[in-house]
Image (tube, rainbow, N blue to C red):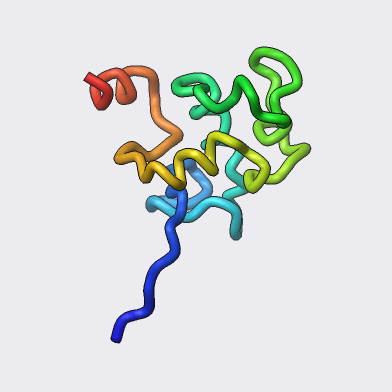
Amino acid sequence: MSKKRDRQVTCKCSAYKFPHRIGGGRCDGSDWAYSYMTLVGTDCISCNCLRAPGECDVVNGTESIKYCDGAESHLHRQEKYRLPMSEEEFFILKN
């Protein structure tokens, strides 16, 4: 019987050369959070980590990715795209 896998947010930042889980090893999630904030940002509006527009505690490394409302929401929705990505990549996937 196979072990049930936990849901996870996958990141494709430069910490590793392959898509990886956020929050362990060299990936702190700040690149993912920055990409989410600038491209999606839906959950940033009510997130406690957002100090001012464009100023996120997860992005600047003050808070852990586990406090990011966007990561939590992304985890539950299981979005098909993997952040960080360019605006062009995001636009192509959304259309």
11, above or below 69, in the image: below
Residue 86 spot, x, y in % from top left: 39, 24
Identify the residue at horizontal 74%, vertical 40% (top origin). 63
Q: Between 13 and 6, which is closer to the camera in this rendering?
A: 6
10, above or below 24, in the image: above
Screen quadrant of the C terminus:
top left
Along the horizontal axis of the image, is 18 left or right of 27?
left
Q: Between 63 and 48, which is closer to the camera in this rendering?
A: 48
Residue 65 spot, x, y in % from top left: 63, 44
Along the horizontal axis of the image, is 64 left or right of 33?
right
Number of numbered discs on residues: 0
Identify the residue at horizontal 31%, vertical 81% (top origin). 2
Residue 25 spot, x, y in % from top left: 60, 59
Residue 55 spot, x, y in % from top left: 70, 20
20, above or below 14, in the image: below
Identify the residue at horizontal 53%, vertical 48% (top origin). 15
Q: Using the rendered view, name the quadrant where residue 24 is placed.
A: bottom right
Looking at the image, the residue that sits furthest to the bottom is 1
